[in-house]
Amino acid sequence: MLKFLFTNESEVSQSKAFFAQTVAKFEKVLKIKIAEILKGNTGEISLTLVNDSAIQKLNRKYRGKNMPTDVLSFAYMEDAGVAQIREISLQIGDIFISVDTAKTQAKEHGHSLKKELEILFVHGLLHLFGFDHGDDKEEREMEKWAGKVLEHIL
């Protein structure tokens, strides 16, 4: 089971319930992978909505890139190490989304800010659970799972 924490540091009003619903869809679609990682524990995930200035600082500090980006994920667990952990709640990771960049991308893609935030959140969640897009094969796999989560109806 996933526990979801939400902070909105942006100037755009966005409800925790919207993102909590995305977490529920993610859990249903990736139930087996999540169970393998958590080994019966509860996993904590946090999402923070920020502006471009804040995400640029994080991007510079942790990735050495002095520019804003849309989403950053910080995973705190590796699959191999979880087997030895027997806590009640495991900190899976933190996701930061720039609402400023999400607005720009939503306009470019011709959909709502809400839809773009959901896409970015799912992308961040997939990174927390070991998915990556370092090559074409990994990117296709990640896109496949993202599509499944985004299309899933509760």
Image (tube, helix red, strand yellow):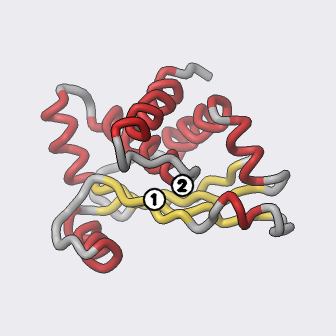
Residue 93, how many percent across, how many down? 56, 63
N-terminal of the pair, mark 1 or mark 2, is: 1
Front one among 51 and 72 = 72
| For residue 43, side relative to residue 94 (left or right) | right
The quadrant of the image that shows the C terminus is top right
Residue 129, how many percent across, how many down? 58, 50
Residue 118, how many percent across, how many down? 41, 38
Who's the residue at 35% across and 75% down the image? Answer: 62
Which residue corresponds to mark 2?
128
Question: Is 21 drawn above or below residue 77 in the view shown?
Answer: above
Who's the residue at 34% across and 54% down the image? Answer: 71
Question: Is 111 drawn above or below residue 40 in the view shown?
Answer: above
**At numbered mark 1, what does the secondary structure look like: helix, strand or loop?**
strand
Nearer to us of marks 1 and 2 is: 2
Tag count: 2
Residue 95, how many percent across, how many down? 45, 59
| For residue 50, side relative to residue 110 (left or right) | right
**At numbered mark 2, what does the secondary structure look like: helix, strand or loop?**
helix
Q: Residues within 10 Å of mark 2 (few under 14, many from 20)?
A: many
Residue, far bottom? 61
Q: Which disc number belongs to residue 32?
A: none
Front one among 92 and 112 = 92
Which residue corresponds to mark 1?
95
| For residue 38, side relative to residue 62 (left or right) | right
Front one among 58 and 127 = 127
Who's the residue at 76% across and 47% down the image? Answer: 36
Quarter where residue 82 is shown: bottom right
Who's the residue at 81% across and 68% down the image? Answer: 85
Tell me whether the residue at label 1 lies in contact with that at label 2, contact meaning CB atoms closer than 8 angstroms.
yes
Name the kind of residue labelled 1 in the image: Ile
Name the kind of residue labelled 2 in the image: Leu
Mark 1 vs mark 2, CA separation in Å = 8 Å
